[in-house]
Amino acid sequence: MILAQPGAFALRTLRAFRANQGLLLAGAVAYYALLSLVPMLIVIVIALSHVVDAQVLMDALGRYLEWVVPGQSGAILSELQRFLDHRTVLGWVLLGTMFFFSSLAFTVLENAMSIIFVHRVAIRRRHFLVSALLPYCYILFLGFGLLIVTLISASLEAMGQNGIDLLGRHWAFGDTSGVLLYLLGVGGEALLLTSIYLVMPVGSLSVRHAALGGVTATLLWEISRHVLVWYFATLSQVTVVYGSLTSAIAALLSMEIAATFLLFGAQVIAEYERLGLEARSASPEPLHTD
């Protein structure tokens, strides 16, 4: 039905997203994501700094933070650097507080997914211990993902600065490494969104359905991200209006747009599942004889 009537499916998805108050849910997810972003990154960076050089880690993080909060990564990086410079004086109470705030975004996102995938919740509910531990498991997963991305980025940057001598000519990889870094970011973004769709909804979700939502959200966010970068660089008057609050307002706006696409991708998956349920529950055609 999707390939035969893509317009009808898109309209159905938009109506369901509006009925679920998708923009209101996205606002809640964006607010708690902004509240959780810095504490979560502090915990991850402090942990990974024992494995990877801190400057290499910060360089990779700064590059890919631009994918989450376009134009505002500098303010976040400066805050992270401040905590990283004074990590030896962090107490257990502060560390526990950061762990708690880091988990809030995932808790709200799980609740938002429950509203979109209400047909799953009506059949099966998740145990509260699983819901309590899920955010921390996901933070661990994000930390491991950041470690892998940092190592690959460092290798690609080293490749871009060097080259090879072949057949009497020197072949530089500067442009190639830039393209590969961009593709790494897009691929990592799609993989991250797919993993969210696999983990957050109640029940088991097929990889194909999760990838459908992940690719949809990735394409929508990539288009919007470039528009936001252009807008903040050329037309935005947010600095005049909000002054010292500019970074927080711009980051919140970016996160709300990203959360909208994230939940819309989930709605695409939910509507695709409902089409299958409707097809299976449809009554068979009666048998007629001449």
Image (spheres, rainbow, N blue to C red):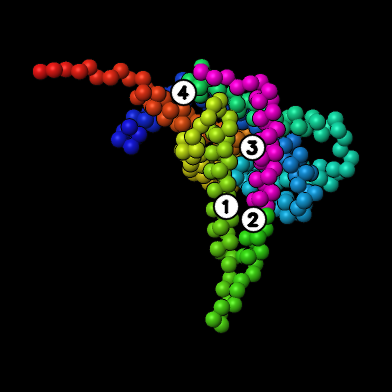
Residue 127 lies left or right of residue 84; in this view the side is: left
Is residue 147 in sight in this rendering?
yes
Q: Which mark is residue 184?
A: 1
Q: How far apart are labels 3 and 4 at the CA level?
A: 24 Å
> Disc 4 designates what residue?
18
In this picture, which residue range is highlighted in magenta? 123-150
Label 1 secondary element = helix
The residue sitting at the bottom extreme is 168
Q: Name the N-terminal-most of marks 3 and 1.
A: 1
Q: Name the N-terminal-most of marks 1 and 4.
A: 4
Amino acid type, label 2: Ile
Question: Looking at the image, do the residues carrying marks 1 and 2 touch, with CB atoms under 8 Å apart?
Answer: yes
Q: Nearer the viewer, mark 1 or mark 4?
A: 1
Q: How far apart are labels 1 and 2 at the CA level?
A: 9 Å
Magenta highlight: main SS: helix
Q: Measuring 82% from the left and 34% from the top, which residue is drawn there?
A: 95
Label 2 secondary element = helix
Amino acid type, label 3: Ala
Amino acid type, label 4: Arg
Q: Name the N-terminal-most of marks 1 and 2.
A: 2
Quadrant in which the N terminus appears: top left
Q: Quadrant of residue 102?
A: top right
**Image location of residue 246, percent across then percent down:** 67, 37
Q: Which mark is residue 152?
A: 2
Is residue 28 in sight in this rendering?
no
Q: Nearer the viewer, residue 255 or 176?
A: 176
**Image location of residue 57, percent across then percent down:** 72, 51
Question: Looking at the image, do the residues carrying marks 2 and 4 touch, with CB atoms under 8 Å apart?
Answer: no
**Image location of residue 101, percent across then percent down:** 73, 29
